Amino acid sequence: MKHLIDPTDLSKEEIDQIVALAEDIIAHRKRYQGSMAHKKLATLFYEPSTRTRLSFTAAMMELGGQVLGFSNPQASSVSKGETVQDTVRVVGCFADIIAMRHPIEGAPLVASQVSNVPIINAGDGSHSHPTQTLTDLLSIKRELGHIDDITIGFCGDLRFGRTVHSLIKALSRYNGIKVVLIAPHELRLPDYIKEDVCDKMGVTYRETESLDEAIPELDVLYMTRVQKERFLDEEEFERVKDSFVLDARRMALAKEKMVVLHPLPRVNEILTEVDDDPRAAYFRQVENGKFVRMALIVSLMDWRKDPAHAMPEPDEPIIDPTLHCTNSKCICNTESHQPQFRLAENGIMRCWYCESKVR
Ligand code: ASP
Ligand code: CP
């Protein structure tokens, strides 16, 4: 069964296929109108969302399918203590495919372990957001004409911004990618992305705290919101919340063809004066999200039973009772899942579910 929990669950060829299918859907919308007739998508959203949930809904409707689910877990039996795995087993009796967003890291992964229908991770904590990544890749492709050979700057909250983590993972499979990480010290990219992804895959990256210094060299500027809801320390949030603001003055320093992306919602990190600049692509990006989710639903439903599209073979998990994941937002610490670990190539032990370093 093919699920999408992490961008690396898809090969580069599969990603390119989904992006190409999305482009074909854009060009021939009518052709796909009945392709999900009599099929149901469940959207299980344990965390707020506008774009992801509604674009999945619109995508399934446009494919002729139907949608059920919840956007407020408190109105479901989750409020009575039902686990993620039990919820998914139940919803799999009603739906053909499930999109799940959860504040706890690893929740969609444990859901996929028991599900009889494909699970799509619509965002898990500050870990991963692979369908935003597909949206971002389609946007880059449509704006620039190619994904290879770009210099992309990620600006803002690179620590908690799950869209950044997933996009870097996916881009690491393309050629000639240069990454500039623009963040204050407190919001720097987690080590597991720098070491296990960039270093391992040979992605060139550098870190800076100055957007002014970085902006002239960028083909894509990927702005992000400081993720208030992920901070355990409110004072720390207050210190960094206004770190970067993109305005017309800074846009004047950028290339004529630079593309500005943002997964949205924005708070104050892009002034509205930038919205009319032709390089501001973040609202076009939202629409791409619907088309790419249409392509994803069609692909996962097609690939369900096709051995050529099986999930990648996982490493053998390490089970060691002396090791602990210290991430309080990891599913192994919030539900009773056996802690499991994997040894990264650099010798660091990481949690199987959330990828944080194990102490
Ligand atoms: N909407 C994106 C996410 O859910 C980005 C954000 O919330 O800032 O990760
Ligand atoms: N980009 C994104 O995930 O938006 P929502 O949080 O509104 O779904």
Image (spheres, helix red, strand yellow):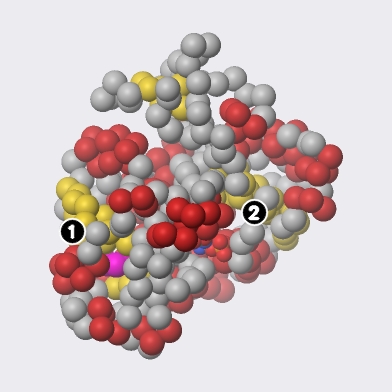
Q: The C terminus lies in which quarter of the figure?
A: top left
Residue 174 vs 250, above or below: the answer is above
Of residues 39 and 126, the one nearer the viewer is 126
**Tag shown at residue 149:** 1
Where, by quadrant of the figure, is residue 218 drawn?
Answer: bottom left
- Percent position of residue 99, x then y: 62, 50
Counting other residues with Cα less than 10 Å from the Cα at mark 1, is it few (<14), some (14-19), or many (20 or more)? few
Kindly identify the amino acid type of the residue bearing the numbered disc 2: Glu
Residue 134 vs 258, above or below: the answer is above
Q: Is residue 129 visible?
A: no
Tell whether position 246 is magenta. Answer: no
Kindly identify the amino acid type of the residue bearing the numbered disc 1: Asp
| Residue located at (31% from left, 57% from top) | 183
Magenta portion: prevailing SS class: strand
Secondary structure under tag 1 reads loop
Judge: label 2 CB < 8 Å from ligand 1: yes
Q: Which residues are magenta?
A: 219-223
